[in-house]
Image: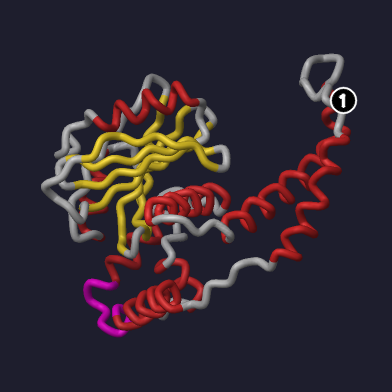
């Protein structure tokens, strides 16, 4: 049975559920025509990423959007959800959704205007990937809490074998992994949930295999970030958890065995 174009596109973008993804992967083993179609779509996606024009939002447009934001300050400060104020909070929900959407747009516009060093550029890519995965509900390509399942799957999709750690802190849940694209190459992304927060851990082989770099922490756009190099692997971690918890998460990932055991 021939696959529909939307099915192929969803497969290439990693948007199918695990069962459907595996079914198509099995068909690729013996269907040359299907394999050619998938390869053509992957090449097209890569070509778009490499050569598509990049446009910075005009200053006038950014000013128009930002001018709308101060209206949000008119919201009452009594937005706690105690018994006496729950109905008051519910009455404001539609406006809060609008303000949240506006804030996301302003953040995106500011994102396009930041041009500093290589590290800043890469940090921006990390933020964009993390936000895209959480907003688009495409957190993982391989959904499993077992590193014996996730590690081989990622290794088969990448040109390296990433270390995979199942647990971060008490209460954390390992959701699985996906293949992402950062710093001009495919990378491994491991995804965890710490309470109500998503933690993304990206890794790929470093350009300087013999060098180890200490952990560098930063905060940007409300996200905690950390990056370091160890045992020939570059690591970037990002989440919106509070700072102390994030430091503990990074410490847990940093001391993990390079083999991912």
Q: Does the magenta stretch include residue 57?
A: no
Q: Residue at x 45, y 33 (%)?
A: 193
Q: Is residue 184 above or below residue 32?
A: above
Mark 1 nearby-residue class (10 Å; few <14, some 14–19, many ≥20): few
Q: Is residue 9 left or right of residue 90?
A: left
Under circle 1, the secondary element is helix
> What's the residue at 34%, 56% (across, down)?
179
Residue 19 lies, with reference to residue 200, above or below; the image says below
**Residue 260 placement (x, y as % from top left):** 19, 38
Residue 196 in percent (x, y) is at: 54, 30
Q: Can residue 188 be seen in this view?
A: yes
Q: Horizontal placement of 219 versus 157: left or right? A: right
Query: Residue 121 versus residue 257: which sits nearer the camera?
Result: 121
The C terminus lies in quadrant: top left
Classified by dominant secondary structure, the portion drawn in magenta counts as helix
Looking at the picture, the colour scheme in use is secondary structure
State whether residue 103 is above or below residue 9.
above
- The residue segment tinted magenta is 28-35
Would you name the residue on which mark 1 appears? 87
Residue furthest front as drawn: 116
Quarter holding residue 249: top left
Q: Which residue is drawn at 22% across and 31% down?
A: 256
Camera sees residue 94? no
Looking at the rendering, in which quadrant would you find the N terminus?
bottom left
Q: Which percent across, then down, holds residue 152?
A: 20, 50
At x 83%, y 22%, the residue is 78
Give the percent coordinates (x, y) of residue 230: 19, 40
Res 180 quadrant in image? bottom left
Q: On the picture, is 1 further left or further right than 88? A: left
Q: Quadrant of residue 228?
A: top left
Residue situated furthest left in the rendering:
210
Total marks shown come to 1
């Amino acid at each position: 049975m021939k696959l529909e174009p939307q099915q192929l596109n969803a497969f290439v973008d990693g948007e199918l559920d695990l069962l459907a993804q595996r079914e198509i992967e099995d068909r690729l083993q013996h269907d040359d025509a299907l394999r050619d179609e998938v390869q053509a779509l992957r090449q097209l996606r890569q070509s778009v990423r490499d050569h598509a024009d990049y446009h910075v939002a005009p200053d006038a447009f950014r000013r128009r959007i930002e001018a709308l934001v101060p209206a949000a300050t008119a919201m009452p400060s009594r937005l706690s959800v105690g018994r006496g104020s729950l109905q008051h909070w519910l009455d404001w929900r539609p406006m809060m959704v609008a303000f949240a959407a506006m804030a996301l747009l302003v953040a995106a516009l500011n994102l396009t205007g930041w041009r500093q060093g290589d590290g800043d550029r890469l940090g921006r890519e990390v933020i964009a990937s993390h936000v895209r995965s959480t907003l688009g509900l495409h957190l993982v390509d391989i959904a499993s809490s077992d590193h014996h399942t996730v590690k081989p799957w990622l290794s088969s999709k990448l040109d390296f074998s990433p270390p995979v750690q199942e647990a971060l802190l008490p209460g954390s849940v390992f959701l699985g992994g996906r293949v992402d694209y950062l710093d001009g190459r495919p990378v491994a992304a491991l995804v965890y949930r710490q309470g109500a927060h998503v933690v993304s851990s990206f890794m790929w082989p470093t350009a300087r295999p013999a060098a180890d770099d200490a952990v560098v922490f930063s905060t940007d756009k409300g996200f905690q970030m950390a990056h370091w190099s160890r045992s020939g692997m570059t690591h970037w971690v990002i989440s919106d958890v509070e700072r102390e918890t994030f430091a503990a998460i990074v410490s847990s990932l940093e001391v993990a065995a390079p083999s991912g055991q």
